[in-house]
Amino acid sequence: MPKCKFYIVDVFAERKFEGNQLAVFICEEVLFEAEMQKIAKEMNYSETTFITSKENYDIRIFTPEVELPFAGHPTIGTSLVIQQEIIKGNVKTILLNLKIGSIPVLFKYKSGKPDVIWMEHNSPTFGRFFDKELLSQILNLDESHIDDRFPIQEVSTGIPFIIVPLKNLAALKKVKVDVDKYLDLVEKTEAKAILIFCPETRNKGNDLSVRVFAYYHGVPEDPATGSGNGCLAAYLVKHQYYIKDSINARVEQGYEVGRPSLLYLKAEKNEEEIISVSVGGKAFIVAEGELR
């Protein structure tokens, strides 16, 4: 195994040791795909990333089970490592080359240090609708817990998610996924993860509470999900959740798994009905080491 430097990053964290943890590897030699997948499985974070070109910022992203073409917190966390450990200076933007294509990342600074880091998403696509009876069974909820003013729908800005609107925080906390029924559903759908949300929050100042389940990817519940919340932002604008064509929202996630996270969402629909989406958050490098 080639010698690799790695960094542990807390992403979508308002302070260290919160948010969603990520391992970012910079290797002196080329790793085979099987080696990267093995490392990601051993690290056992929701995602692990590999910077395969320090010049072009080529990035590979792996869950413990599969490679992903795109993901939110790896994009932001890897950008922070590039800014601090490769560029070693303040920059306004970094363009990451992911399997899905190039993703722009915008840095905001406070007292000379990175503050909120924003990533642009691809234009969203909207897929099939789902029956609330089916999703209530998968989530072990009563149908009355689902907010039927809005649809249950598949949305993608790079990775598809099934978006489920709930009425309140009590319903969100009550969810317990029936894994067999979940796996049966996602074997038949493009989306392999479920995002549930409600307008009630634990912390004043936040706008939405979110939970994400991705057993298919080896992640029972994700502490913070940039790709999923990008899909949510597009969904909120598409279905006029706030009765307007734009949103600027704060989303809390990760409380059920002991990793409280905060994500910032922006989305806007223009005159051509095209929705633009950005997701932001703070990040901190909390540890580093070498893998031999």
Image (cartoon, rainbow, N blue to C red):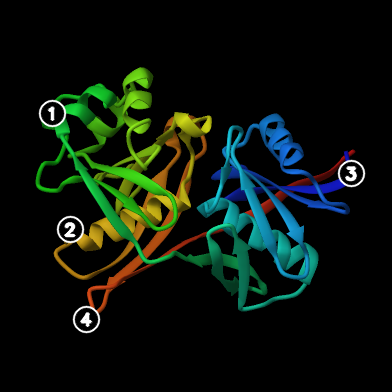
For mark 4, what is the residue? 271
Residues at marks 3 and 4, CA–CA distance in whole angstroms: 51 Å
Q: Are marks 3 and 1 in contact (CB under 8 Å)?
A: no
Q: Residue at x 51, y 34 (%)?
A: 217
Looking at this view, is 190 or 282 the one in front?
A: 190
Disc 4 residue crowd, few under 14, some 14–19, many 20+, Cα 10 Å = few
Residue type beneath disc 2 = His
The C terminus sits in image quarter: top right
In the image, what residue type sits under mark 3?
Pro
Q: Is residue 21 visible?
A: yes
| Pointer 2 with pointer 1, Cβ within 8 A | no
Per the model, the C-alpha gap separating discs 3 and 1 is: 52 Å
Where is residue 57? Give x, y as percent: 70, 65
194 in relation to 68, above or below: above
Q: Amino acid at mark 4?
A: Glu
Q: Which residue is mark 1?
A: 143
For disc 2, the marked residue is 239
- Residue 194, compared with residue 232, is above or below; it is above
Which of disc 4 and disc 1 is earlier in sequence? Answer: 1
